[in-house]
Amino acid sequence: MNIETITFENNTLRIINQARLPGKYERVALTSLEDVINAIQSLMVRGAPAIGIVAAYGFYIHVKNLKAEGPLPIDKVVHSADLLKNARPTAVNLQWAVDRMLNIYKINENKHNLLELLKDTAIKIHQEDKESCERIGQYGARLISDSMHILTHCNAGILATGGIGTALAPVYTAYKEGKNIHIYVDETRPVGQGARLTYWELTHNNVPATLIADNMAAGLMHMNKIDMIIVGADRIASNGDVANKIGTYGLAVLAKHHGIPFYIAAPCSTFDMRIKRGDDIPIEYRPDHEITGYWQIDNMNYHVYNPAFDITPADLISAIITENGVINKPNKKNIQSNLKPEEFVL
Ligand code: MRU
């Protein structure tokens, strides 16, 4: 597991530039609020937990930079926090992490050690996510038997978190336990997080994987080649509906039709108990060129529809795996008894 997606050493935040993977492995230092927002929006760093962690460090770095310039009015800090929170709208981990940092700021605004407290909180958010991934891995691996073929979509692995991933955590744990497993990786059009990132990190860790185009999943299911589907989440509504990478909903419908278990793996920071149902989750629309650019044809001025996420209704989900255990038949009651109250987004 020698991939360090996000590092914070000698007071410097560095990320792997995922926009260039797998062609180029490049680590980039982020030294300002603008750097962090740009990295999140351009998908240099992506995946719900990872953008929350980077935003937390970004908040600390920004306050440190501003304080070096002189007195810092709270309005300015709140405004910066809003800019960070809105860098991408769907993954609630981003808001959750920034709100947690802002709260520490407000409580300790006049303390001499404010910067230390902010830095410690960002490190804690990072460390907690790493531990959540481990526990998701342990709970999820119990659902995986020897010789299983598992389908995953997008990238919910090491590159998307502070640890071994959410959807890929059970995979890595089961593999480490010696289970003979094989992963089908959806390309995940339009940006190719599966083809570029998931395949890269799985094979980097010796997990047997096969890349498929997104439209091949149904055929594999029909041929009984898929035993289980595990994906991540960007936001989970209080009724268990899940927003995740575009294409997730289609896989859940297919899984239901073929009687294949469909799992979501996500930390508690991905739940948004303020939101009643999936259709109320804000969906991000991405630029046209993410779709047209693939063809490398000039002047492709087409009308494009490019939502980054879709909603999977709770009744298509077999279970949600969190760091606290497995939520079978996800609904408000079952979710509430899995989450600890302080982990709700209020
Ligand atoms: O647009 P992305 O690459 O940020 O989308 C990522 C996903 O949809 C992941 O499945 C989700 O964030 C979970 S990552 C552990």
Image: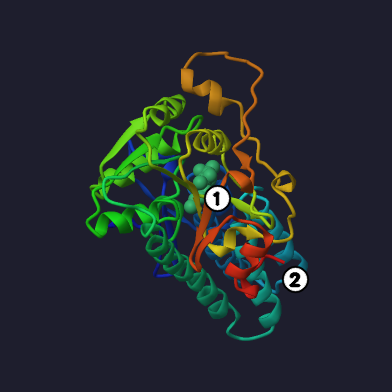
Q: Is residue 98 visible?
A: no
Q: Is residue 15 visible?
A: yes
Confirm if mark 1 falls within 8 A of ligand 1: yes
Q: Residue furthest right?
A: 75
**Dot 1 surroundings within 10 Å: few (below 14), some, or many (20 or more)?**
many
Query: Residue at 37% across / 27% down in the picture?
Result: 223
Query: Residue at 64% across / 86% down in the picture?
Result: 111
Residue 282: image location, x then y, percent:
71, 45
Q: In this view, does 127 lie above or below 272?
A: below
**Left or right of residue 10: residue 38:** right
Check residue 233 in the rendering and tell me which mark sits there, or answer none: 1
Question: Answer yes or no: do the residues labelled 1 and 2 have beta carbons within 8 Å?
Answer: no
Circle 1 — which element? loop
Circle 2 — which element? helix
Instruction: Examine the image and state in which quarter residue 76 appears.
Output: bottom right
Query: Residue at 45% across / 55% down in the picture?
Result: 166
**Left or right of residue 337: residue 293:** left
**Dot 2 surroundings within 10 Å: few (below 14), some, or many (20 or more)?**
few
Say which residue label 2 marks. Answer: 74
Instruction: Examine the image and state in which quarter residue 32 appears.
Output: bottom right
Q: Is residue 120 above or below residue 35?
A: below
CA separation in Å, label 1 and label 2:
33 Å
Q: Quadrant of the N terminus?
A: bottom left
Q: Residue furthest bottom?
A: 112
Residue 305: image location, x then y, percent:
65, 26
The mark that comes first in sequence, 1 or 2, is: 2
Amino acid type assigned to the residue bearing label 2 in the image: Ile
Q: In which quarter of the image is the C terminus?
A: bottom right
Check residue 94 in the rendering and tell me which mark sits there, or answer none: none
